[in-house]
Image (cartoon, rainbow, N blue to C red):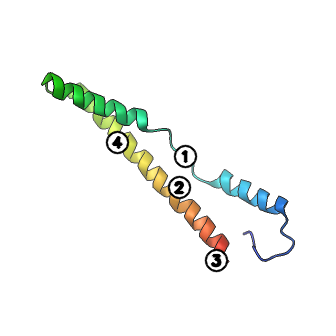
């Protein structure tokens, strides 16, 4: 672990430590706005045409929403990871 109060810690040491943390960090999920826009468009189209959503279309929408759920969980985990790392850094 990186020790903050040690005088031998140079900028290079800090940079290497940060690069290591980044390398070990969970990956950031893909950009989710296109999936959200797709689901909204499908729902609006169904509402405006007053047609029911077909079973196949419903499966597509559910798959997109489940993907968003997984990505949101990944973002939460990523936030907890970095919060924990910086909390450890500043407390110790």
Q: For residue 28, which numbered disc appears in the image?
A: 1
Q: Does residue 65 sit above or below 8 in this rendering?
A: above
Quarter of the image that includes the C terminus? bottom right
Residue bearing mark 4: 66
Find the distance from the CA under tag 3 to the CA under tag 1: 26 Å
Density class for disc 2 (Cα within 10 Å; few <14, some 14-19, many ≥20) is: some
Density class for disc 4 (Cα within 10 Å; few <14, some 14-19, many ≥20) is: few
First along the sequence among labels 2 and 3: 2
Residue bearing mark 2: 78
Find the distance from the CA under tag 2 to the CA under tag 3: 20 Å
Quadrant housing residue 48: top left
Q: Does residue 72 sit above or below 42 in this rendering?
A: below
Residue 70, horizontal then vertical, whole percent: 41, 46
Looking at the rendered image, the disc whose residue lies closer to the viewer, 4 or 3, is: 3
- Asked whether the beta carbons under mark 2 and mark 4 sit within 8 Å of each other, the answer is no
First along the sequence among labels 1 and 2: 1
Quarter of the image that includes the N terminus? bottom right
Q: Does residue 26 sit above or below 54 in this rendering?
A: below
Q: Nearer the viewer, residue 46 or 58?
A: 46
Residue at (67, 70) in percent of width and height: 89
Residue bearing mark 3: 91
- Asked whether the beta carbons under mark 4 and mark 3 sit within 8 Å of each other, the answer is no
């Amino acid at each position: 672990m990186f020790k903050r109060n040690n005088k031998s810690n140079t900028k290079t040491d800090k940079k290497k430590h940060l690069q290591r943390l980044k390398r070990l960090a969970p990956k950031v999920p893909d950009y989710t706005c296109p999936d959200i826009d797709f689901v909204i468009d499908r729902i609006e189209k169904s509402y405006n045409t007053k047609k029911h959503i077909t079973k196949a279309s419903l499966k597509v929408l559910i798959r997109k929403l489940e993907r968003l759920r997984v990505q949101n969980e990944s973002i939460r985990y990523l936030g907890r990871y970095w919060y924990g790392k910086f909390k450890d850094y500043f407390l110790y």
